[in-house]
Image (tube, helix red, strand yellow):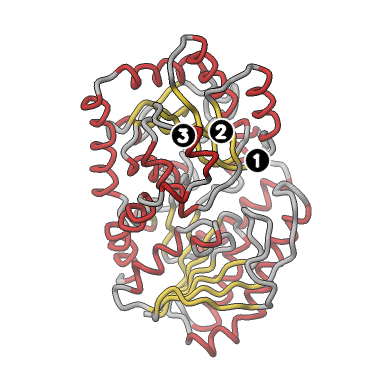
Amino acid sequence: MNIWIIDHYSSEPKHGGISRQYDFANGLSSRGHKVLVVSSAFSHFSHKYITTEECMTSEVNPNAYYAYVRTPEYSENKSAKRFLNTLAFVKSVLKNEKKLVKKFGKPDVVVGCSIHPFTWIAAYKISQKYGARFIAEVRDLWPASWIYNKGLNPKHPKALLFSTLEKWAYDRAETIIYSMSKGHEYISDILGYPREKMIWIDQPMDCERFDKNAERYNELPAEIREFIGDDFLCVFGGYYMIYEGVYEMLEAAKILSDKGLPVKFVFVGSGKEAEGMQKYVDDNNLDNVLVYGRISKELIPALLRRAQVTLAHLAVKNNPNSYRFDASKNKINEYMYSGSCIVYGTCLKDHFVKTSGAGYTITPYSSEEFADRIETVYMMPEEERAVFGRKACEYIKSNNTLEVLTDKYESILNK
């Protein structure tokens, strides 16, 4: 079967983008399918070009390829230029589609992957042209994310536009793949689409690749390794944003420092709060905190495997309904497989981080709870602490390995 996956923000791990489709390209191609992932040549994460060519192809393996199509650059994610970039991606995919068919053959299935829903338009048009099946994948619920998380009026023109677009795609899709754990509560329970049309396929974990990269600790920047030393370590990786709870984590670091506990915090990532975070560290003389920039995605496992605690947070302040359908956070699965204990600030009290035994869920925006849970883990005997990691690994191996999720993916391809 010839499968095309259209995903604006995907890329091979060496380029630092979202590796979901890379993993599925490997998983599906290992089962005898041909897979082409079509993505943007401009990285949403590094704000740099992967290539300046109009359309460049890259081989993942003899049956799986990437095609990077050119889109205009932008420097800020919340900008008019980024919006124009999303529209340009659709145009560029359709512009290069004949060239890709000539090289890789006509698709039997076209999967349109939405972080932004315009991708569905390109995928559907290609599916119709070649008589292929159309599958809609959704990894961010537009406009629901804005309505529930940011208070956007459902009758706002932006909400109406994307509400119309999502229904247009869901009506035409043979199957709807969703990656957030409670996506069915929105797509089925609120929008009314039948459950049998939907399938939850979470973020895949390539455990073999993670284990291999986890051995590369000595390749981490020297500044990070020297800062960590042999101390008890908490790690945050990702965006430096308010909703990620970074200031509450810093406040927790101060609480523990004031108590004299030898606990260190390493932050790796980027975002608009980077300067504010460093200022907090400097103003409070926190010698137990290192705020660092982005590091290679391939080196993240080595840092996570070294941590005793990994930190996460996803909530809008003073909004108990925020992220009520969960979100697709690949790092949560990486945290779980790392063997650390997770401390997660979320409004979802039944999140699988808690129910699996992988760690603690806490009240969002509570630095005291962050500090309390970290101290609890610090005080535990090592064998008791290891239980978190063992249960988390068991959950990942049962639910999120590439093999398990490729089975799920094939179940819809073989319908």
Q: Is residue 59 left or right of residue 43?
A: left
Vertical side of 402 occupied by 149: above or below: above
User: Quick one: which residue is furthest to the bottom in this view?
Assistant: 102
Name the residue tied to disc 1. Answer: 271
Name the residue tied to disc 3. Answer: 235
Circle 3 residues within 10 Å: few <14, some 14–19, many ≥20 = many
Element marked by disc 3? strand
Vertical side of 17 occupied by 276: above or below: above
Image quarter hosting the C terminus: bottom left
Return the disc, 1 or 2, that comes first in the chain's sequence.
Answer: 2
- Residue 327's spot in the image, x, y percent? 48, 42
State the image quarter where residue 349 is shown. Answer: top left
Please report the residue visible at 35 percent of the width from the left and 70 percent of the height from the top.
28
Please report the residue visible at 42 percent of the width from the left and 33 percent of the height from the top.
310
Type of residue at label 1? Gly
Please report the residue visible at 28 percent of the width from the left and 31 percent of the height from the top.
388
Type of residue at label 3? Val
Name the residue tied to disc 2. Answer: 244
Element marked by disc 2? helix
Q: Is residue 402 left or right of residue 108?
A: left
Element marked by disc 1? loop
Return the disc, 3 or 1, that comes first in the chain's sequence.
Answer: 3
